[in-house]
Image: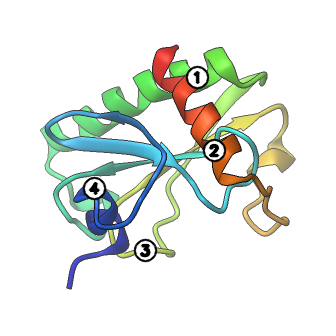
């Protein structure tokens, strides 16, 4: 059965897409730690990030770098934190989180809430960056 991320990539589940190429897809996390929290996934369904082949692993990091640059251009922050947890969905993914301090990457803290319109507007600003 396809993972939720595979279904998002296929357009079966709506998302706020930030970027896409032949191998990777980036979108806003619908349960974000903060404004601009995004996920970067390979289109090929692989459970663990480190199961990606070397070239594919390097490629997802280069793709994530460009997405992070765009997020930082739009969301005020000191830097973009990166996290690979891999427990939530059995499909490799990288979290990109705008941060100003270490506590901003605490995945146990309450999540930020945004409306569909706020997510859509933010995604549009990031795509244009």
Label 3 element class? loop
Q: Which residue is mark 3?
A: 89
Q: Is residue 46 above or below residue 25?
A: below
| Gap between marks 2 and 3 measured at Cα | 21 Å
| Gap between marks 1 and 2 measured at Cα | 10 Å
Q: Which residue is mark 4?
A: 9
| Gap between marks 3 and 4 measured at Cα | 14 Å
Q: Nearer the viewer, residue 53 or 31?
A: 31
Q: Residues within 10 Å of mark 2 (few under 14, many from 20)?
A: many
Q: Nearer the viewer, mark 3 or mark 4?
A: 4
Label located before the other in sequence (2 or 3): 3
Residue 49 place in picture, x, y as percent = 32, 57
Q: Name the residue rendered at 66%, 20% in the picture.
A: 74
Q: Is residue 72 above or below residue 29?
A: above
| Gap between marks 2 and 4 measured at Cα | 17 Å
The image quadrant that residue 9 belongs to is bottom left
Label located before the other in sequence (2 or 4): 4
Q: Are marks 3 and 4 in contact (CB under 8 Å)?
A: no
Q: Which residue is mark 1?
A: 125
Q: Name the residue rendered at 60%, 59% in the picture.
A: 30
């Amino acid at each position: 059965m396809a993972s939720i991320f595979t279904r998002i990539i296929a357009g079966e589940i709506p998302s706020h897409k930030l970027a896409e190429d032949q191998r990777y897809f980036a979108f806003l996390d619908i349960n974000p730690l903060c404004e601009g929290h995004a996920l970067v996934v390979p289109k090929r369904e692989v459970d663990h990030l480190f199961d990606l082949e070397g070239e594919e692993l390097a490629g997802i990091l280069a793709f994530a770098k460009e997405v992070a640059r765009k997020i930082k251009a739009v969301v005020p922050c000191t830097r973009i934190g990166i996290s690979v947890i891999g427990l939530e969905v059995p499909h490799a993914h990288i979290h990109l989180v705008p941060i100003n301090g270490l506590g901003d990457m605490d995945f146990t803290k309450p999540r930020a809430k945004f409306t569909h319109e706020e997510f859509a507007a933010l995604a549009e600003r990031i795509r244009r960056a």
